[in-house]
Amino acid sequence: MAGDVKYHIGFGSDDIAGIDIALVSGDPERAKRIAEQYLTLEKPLSTVRGLNSYVGKTPGGKRIVSATSGMGAPSLSIVINELAQVGIRHIIRIGTCGSIQAHVPSGSVVISRASLCRQGAAEDIAPTEYPAAASPFWTMALADAAAKIGAQWHVGLTASVDTFFEGQERSDTSYNKTLLRKNQGMMDEYQSLRVLNFEMESGTLFKMANVYGLGAGCVCAVVAARVESETVSYEAKVKAEADAIRTAIQAVDDINPAWLGEHYRW
């Protein structure tokens, strides 16, 4: 291990020399699954704090990192900061989400072009009004990749919030049945604003990427159709997660190299 090993992620720049792209998942098992089943695994990097990370090679021959961000924006903010410190310059989040529009069913994937950011961690990165926008280049690459692999895909706006239950107006499946007034009617309001889905990390990721001068994208598997139910569909999760992973990897292999240089910087 290198001498610049970072405290939280458990590896340093020498451990990923020549690599500048990371796929980041909230679930450590997803990060492991990506490395072992979708990439040619080169080596594990760390399992410190359950933040599993690996080096692998895509089918197109690109060496990348598959890393765990943990659940929620505070954990993600630590991981993204340390990934940037060790040389990562492009991050694609592969997550799960709940859709709030009828035309976005369980089993499909959502590619976030920007996020409505209601996250405390992001307030430490940039002002509230600072745009939480994905890289247009990665967004286009992800959309092209999703079409190429035959996924059912959607591109649009995401509501990125701090809590899974109250912050996403869940009460049927929550221990807490009483929501604050600000959270009552949230889904209806966001539907009218043409927001496609709820998730918990993209807003902070996008703000960090723009402040740090990184490229970032986000593709999420739709595991709950909130217009029908609050409950996660595990059957839909299997297909949608696989499509989200395949979309991200295809985007890495196909993205125009010219889009990864000076054009994504401020």
Image (tube, grey):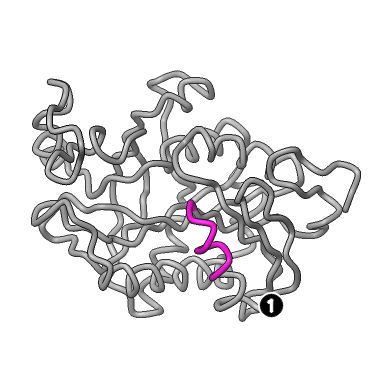
Q: Is residue 31 magenta?
A: yes
At horizontal 31% and vertical 58% (from top left) the residue drawn is 110
Q: Is residue 124 left or right of residue 99?
A: right
Q: Compared with residue 45, is residue 85 higher up or lower down, i.e. above or below?
A: above
User: Quarter of the image holding residue 28?
Assistant: bottom right
User: Quarter of the image holding residue 127?
Assistant: top left
Residue pointed to by mark 1: 61
Q: Compared with residue 76, is residue 124 higher up or lower down, i.e. above or below?
A: above
Q: Who is closer to the viewer here, 75 or 197?
A: 75
Q: Is residue 168 magenta?
A: no
Under circle 1, the secondary element is loop
Total labels: the figure holds 1
Quadrant into which the C terminus falls: top right
Q: Who is closer to the viewer here, 20 or 165?
A: 165
Q: Is residue 159 left or right of residue 86?
A: left
At horizontal 9% and vertical 32% (from top left) the residue drawn is 185
At horizontal 69% and vertical 49% (from top left) the residue drawn is 48
**Residue 214 horizontal/vertical position (percent):** 61, 42
**Residue 247 horizontal/vertical position (percent):** 44, 69
The amino acid pointed to by label 1 is Gly
Q: Main secondary structure of the magenta part?
A: helix
> Which segment did they paint magenta?
26-33
